[in-house]
Image (cartoon, rainbow, N blue to C red):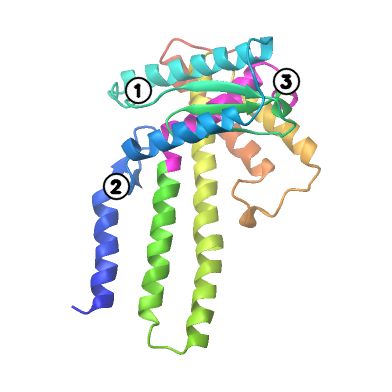
Amino acid sequence: MNFKIKFLFGIILAIVISCAKNPFTGKSTMALVPNSQIFPTAFQQYGQFLSENKVLKGTAEAKKIELIGMKIKTASERWLNANGHADYLEGYAWEYNLVDSKELNAWCMPGGKIVFYTGILPVCKDDAGIAAVMGHEVAHALANHGQQRMSAGLLQQLGAVGTQVAVGNKSPETQAMIMQAYGVGSQVGGMLPFSRSHESEADQIGLTLMAIAGYDPINAVKVWERMSALSSGQAPPEILSTHPSNQTRINELTALIPQAKAEAAKFGVTFK
């Protein structure tokens, strides 16, 4: 077996060994880096971010972010317990902070460290809108999307090395051309759609969590309708974006509402 074949075989073997099944998606996903290594680093970075930004504490809005975050977290615990995954959240350390910023954004680091910017609150509009965004961010943590993206990044680097090995006997010009093609292909054909699939998964999981927490999932659609109105058609083409287009998101969320309501009904939560 020559070196190139051994190298590629090693990559495939590493992927197979490191796959983990996620209870929320039912999919086997890459876990080349364990959460036991990711979480401490994420928590440290989160603390550093908070120290460098204006975190609002004790205000009505800050308390609301924390309260709704706890409700969504509790909904996830109820779902996990009911589905036989009571120990799934081991190592998670949930935290919800409101940061003074005009950015229309919220995000979640691996392990449950969440930030809302004040700029997104008018788009959320009310508690249900906050719950929609919170559910989406909590879902990223629960689906281990940070871990998957890190694993994909490592795999991409390995693939680049493999490509160099495969074309090593070519001229420098040919090598450069192939490597450039690999960079474009892996980004547009691989990493961007991979990120869009994460966003869609987080939308689906988040919709269910907000419903279990008692918030009508129709409000997730309303949030994205308001977001779409603000963008005024300025979003990049979907194929070049890490997120689905606003309209794609609205369509997918609308189609998922009956499923989210049915799941919430299992926990005694119903909507008109």
Q: Earlier in the sequence, mark 2 or mark 3?
A: 2
Mark 1, residue position = 80
**In the rendered image of this protein, does residue 138 appear above or below residue 186?**
above
Under circle 2, the secondary element is strand
In magenta stretch: residue 130: yes
Percent from the top left, x then y, of residue 196?
A: 55, 47
Image-based side of 160 in relation to 135, left or right:
left
Mark 2, residue position = 19
Image-based side of 22 in relation to 171, left or right:
left
At 35% from the left and 22% from the top, the residue drawn is: 80
Q: Amino acid at mark 1?
A: Leu
Between the residue at mark 1 and the residue at mark 2, the CA separation in whole angstroms equals: 20 Å
In the image, which is nearer the foreground, mark 1 or mark 2?
Answer: 2
Percent from the top left, x then y, of residue 20?
A: 30, 42
Between the residue at mark 3 and the residue at mark 1, the CA separation in whole angstroms equals: 29 Å
Q: Earlier in the sequence, mark 3 or mark 1?
A: 1
Kindly identify which numbered label has been placed on residue 125: 3
Q: Are marks 1 and 2 in contact (CB under 8 Å)?
A: no
